[in-house]
Amino acid sequence: MYIIIVNSHSGRLTFREVSKQLSMNSDISFVPYFTGDYQEEELWTHAIRFIKENIPTIQGIIIVGGDGTFHQAINHLHNFEIPLGLIPTGSANDFAKALKIPSNEKKALSRIRAGNPKTYDLFKVNDEWVHSLAGMGVDAETAIKSISSPLKKWLNRAFLGRLTYLLTFFTVIKDYKPFQMKLTFQDGESLTYERVWLLAIGNTAYYGGGIPICPKADPQDGKLEITIVHSLSLITLLFVLPTVFFRLHTMLPYVETMQAKALSVKTSQPVLVQADGEKAGYTPQTITIKPKSIKIF
């Protein structure tokens, strides 16, 4: 049996194909939950109750949605240690890109049904589990505003949803004020940065619809990849931006990268934090990695 969590906004059409493929096999049963049929916490309460009652018969939990839906799933379901599968239907699908999960629903479902789940790392931002990236600064402001942007609806209809992040970025950056930041690591070492525009902490490489902000991040190495953009003017930042798409930003003097297993972040002012594109509070924050903590088909 499979439990299927469907993002009602982006996944209904895909679910029709998935259910048709599963129904063609008389030995497979599945129970779907549509996000639009419940209040958010009510959805997870119902799903968790059902999973607890049927754990021995559940082969996997399939998420039909994007990064945000998968984020909610890992925060509510990963303790069951049941393998998760992802059929990406979001506008960005950065986690699917990192794990090379096909965008075609038939191929994604075939990958799930083939079994053989692999083990991946997760990390925590305070009490929030994160599968891909957390961002603090202008990127977090951009990510959160992108969710409710009227541009997203229209760009999704034109299959250009990934442009939402980039276009929103230009509306946010013109008024954004950089900040001072202090990082303290597990061994007690501290580093301070001035005029910080963003801090990205990556378990995988991408955010914002395929932007490789943490290009060397590996979700199976037990480490977090950290990227800091600091000590530059707004004009210089705009010139630096295109280099990110070619993975050349890490060679610039305004960009510092490092790896860590745990760190704390303090800033000169409260700074918005996003986790997998979802709002995750403000600084200060504590970040820790949990290696090999989730199984994904």
Image (spheres, rainbow, N blue to C red):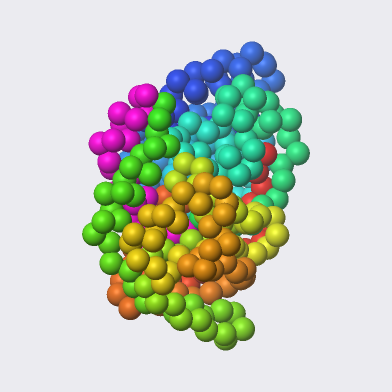
Picture quarter with the C terminus: top right
Identify the residue shown where x is 56% and y is 22%. 18
Residue 94 percent coordinates (x, y) = 52, 43
Say if the magenta span includes residue 153: yes
Say if the magenta span includes residue 47: no
Residue 19 percent coordinates (x, y) = 55, 20
Residue 114 percent coordinates (x, y) = 74, 30
Picture quarter with the N terminus: top right
Q: Is residue 122 above or below residue 31?
A: below
Which residue reaches farthest bottom? Answer: 188
Q: Nearer the viewer, residue 46 or 122?
A: 122
Region rendered in magenta: 134-158
Q: Nearer the viewer, residue 251 or 258?
A: 251
Q: Is residue 42 above or below residue 244?
A: above
Secondary structure that dominates the magenta span: helix
Q: Is residue 89 above or below residue 16?
A: below
Residue 96 percent coordinates (x, y) = 57, 39
